[in-house]
Amino acid sequence: MAFSWKVVHGGRTPPPGEVVRPDERLSWGRTVGIGAQHVVAMFGATFVFPLIMGLDPNLAIMMSGIATILFLLITQDRVPSYLGTSASFVGGVIAIRAMSGSSNGLVTGSILVAGVVLAIIGVLINFLGVGIIHRVFPPAVTGGVVMLIGFGLAYVVADIYWPQDHWVALVTMTAVFLMTVLLRGFWARIAILIGLVFGFVLSWILDKTAGDITAFNPGAGKVDTHARVNFDSVKSADWFGLPDFTAPHFKFSAIVLVLPAVIALIAENTGHVKAVGAMTRTDLDPMIGRAIFADGVGTVVATSVGGSPTTTYAENIGVMAATRIYSTAAYYVAGIVAILFGLIPKFGALVAATPGGVLGGITVVLYGMIGLLGAKIWVENRVDFANPINLVPIGAGIILAIGPVSHQISHDFTLSGIALGTIVLLGGYHLLRWLAPPYMRDALLAGAPFDESAAGAAAGGPYRNQGGTVDDRAAPQSPRHGLDAPEPRQ
């Protein structure tokens, strides 16, 4: 079906209630317009996250376009999606830089390996079925990993960005708050991007009116007096040219730090495919493995030249929901436009000049939103935290990530923060599920609230009635589970 779309509605805007399916399109003029909307929708996060990770935003934009086209080809144009920069790797990248300095090659090489792992998992899912995801990464685990990835980055705001200009950070954060509720429609969707521009302009105005700031300067590595905004790199950059490519290199201790993000990417891709399937009223579950594989390939290709990791973007789902146009032709247009943007080095230098205080105000919102997506997964799947199998390892993993707590394995290998928290959460969950008595496992399978009083009696201990008093009567029996058991919910 690639490059072959049926023109519908006479090429004009579809009437109310009508849709444009993935294998259809409007006139090329309207298709280009929709593609431009997709570019704007992904633009904010796709260049903000490379900036936070210390990678080239120009190259990230360019490679996101290439990765998107690869994704469409691999999924045979059945899953309309844009692959923008993934936020899930931010914590691992910051940990790598703290461990080994500012080597972009080590960062992208580590993410490249994670992309290979993601692609392999996609192949396995394609052959073994999507059910394997729910067995290895049930909602309790997936939500926990997403939450610790977001909240595990709190120290970055507190220790790196906010101290560079705490007043600009506070004002920028407040501006984003107000924009998310006061703006309407499309503008509300890009409130983060508008907030970044606002903070950038505010910093420039303060330089002109209040003078330089005395605060921590990451460039000098110390507190000194300096301008908030430095345009020297923008002036020296060319208008047109290729971005700076970086060859990846590899180190096991760095690779381990970014592997937890793979779990989040599996969840993101699975959710994206299901959302598109629901909007288009098409069963796309058989494409989940192929979509995960395609995202892995996109990440490998992007990072092989120094670009950023990729993932399917919810922002673009919003555009499709608003327009009811699901044509993959528009995504090809978006990919081409992004590639052209990447050929303007001066734009990339301008983005890279964003002051740290502005990033502080932006990231405190972004990281919190990422963390709360994990809670959203729990709520939607009714995860029961009265059950110790869920409560104990997930709680421990999140605290290890937020710390961030470090655990030295050997002289030159330390697990810390998000990586350590993910291993404890995932390994602890499956270990407890394997060792737990039947009544705890049955509660997971039934999807019913965990009854501590019934559980105590089932274990041979005293039974507490509704009043909280002890009674030695026989405990209620756990429900039978077999072929007629309810759908597993964890």
Image: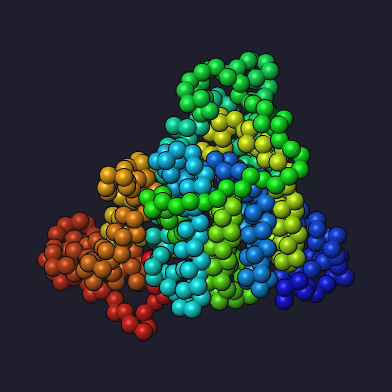
Give coordinates of residue 84: x percent, y percent. 62, 54
Q: 233 above or below 372?
A: above
Residue 276, picture quadrant = bottom right
What quarter of the picture does the C terminus occupy?
A: bottom left
Q: Residue furthest bottom?
A: 483
Figure quadrant of the N terminus: bottom right
260 displayed left or right of 414: right
Q: Residue 119 versus residue 142: which sits nearer the camera?
A: 119
- Residue 22 appears in the figure: yes
Left or right: 385 with respect to 184? left
- Percent across and percent down for residue 417 are 37, 45
What percent of the width, then of the height, locates residue 19?
75, 68
Residue 428: quarter of image: bottom left
What's the colour scheme? rainbow
Could you tell me which residue is drawn at 80 percent across and 74 percent down?
6
| Outermost left residue | 472
Residue visible at 68% across and 18% down in the picture: 208
| Residue 198 appears in the figure | no
Q: Residue at x 66, y 31 (%)?
A: 233
